[in-house]
């Protein structure tokens, strides 16, 4: 018997990264990129709650995201898991 579930917050981001990873794994000869459309222009360098003039990071790769996460950046980490194997 199967179970129904939802992916929860960030589920569409997670789906996008799974699809990108799947395309990469089947040997696509194209450069695979995941672009997530959000209501802000990029990742904020500092929580704007504490620093309203926080600068935007327009683009970031997995290794950079991992590095800033070590300094306390908050990500919906489930969305980046499918991208990990390629970057490590």
Image (spheres, helix red, strand yellow):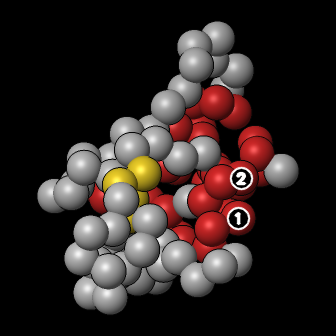
Which percent across, then down, holds residue 24?
64, 30
Depth check, front residue: 6 or 8: 8
Depth check, front residue: 40 or 23: 40
Q: From this viewpoint, which residue is outermost toward the left?
A: 39
The image quarter containing residue 49 is bottom left
Q: Residues within 10 Å of mark 2 (few under 14, many from 20)?
A: few
Q: Residues within 10 Å of mark 1 (few under 14, many from 20)?
A: few
Q: From this viewpoint, which residue is outermost toward the bottom?
A: 50
Q: Is residue 47 left or right of residue 61?
A: left
Could one spot residue 4 in this view of the protein? Answer: no
Which percent across, then down, holds residue 39?
16, 58
Q: Secondary structure at mark 2?
A: helix
Considering only vertical position in the picture, is 39 above or below 73? above
The image quarter containing residue 38 is bottom left
Which percent across, then down, holds residue 9?
30, 77
Marks 2 and 1: CB-CB under 8 Å?
A: yes
**Image point (35%, 55%), residue name:** 56
**Image point (32%, 88%), residue name:** 50
Could one spot residue 69 in this view of the protein? Answer: yes
The residue indicated by pointer 1 is 67
Q: Secondary structure at mark 1?
A: helix
Depth check, front residue: 43 or 10: 43
Which percent across, then down, holds residue 86?
75, 42
The numbered disc on residue 63 is 2
């Amino acid at each position: 018997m199967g179970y129904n579930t939802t992916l929860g917050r960030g589920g569409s981001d997670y789906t996008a990264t799974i699809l990108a990873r799947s395309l990469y794994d089947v040997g696509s000869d194209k450069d695979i990129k995941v672009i997530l459309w959000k209501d802000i222009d990029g990742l904020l360098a500092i929580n704007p709650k504490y620093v309203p003039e926080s600068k935007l990071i327009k683009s970031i790769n997995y290794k950079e995201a991992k590095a800033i996460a070590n300094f306390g950046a908050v990500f919906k980490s489930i969305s980046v898991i499918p991208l990990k194997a390629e970057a490590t």
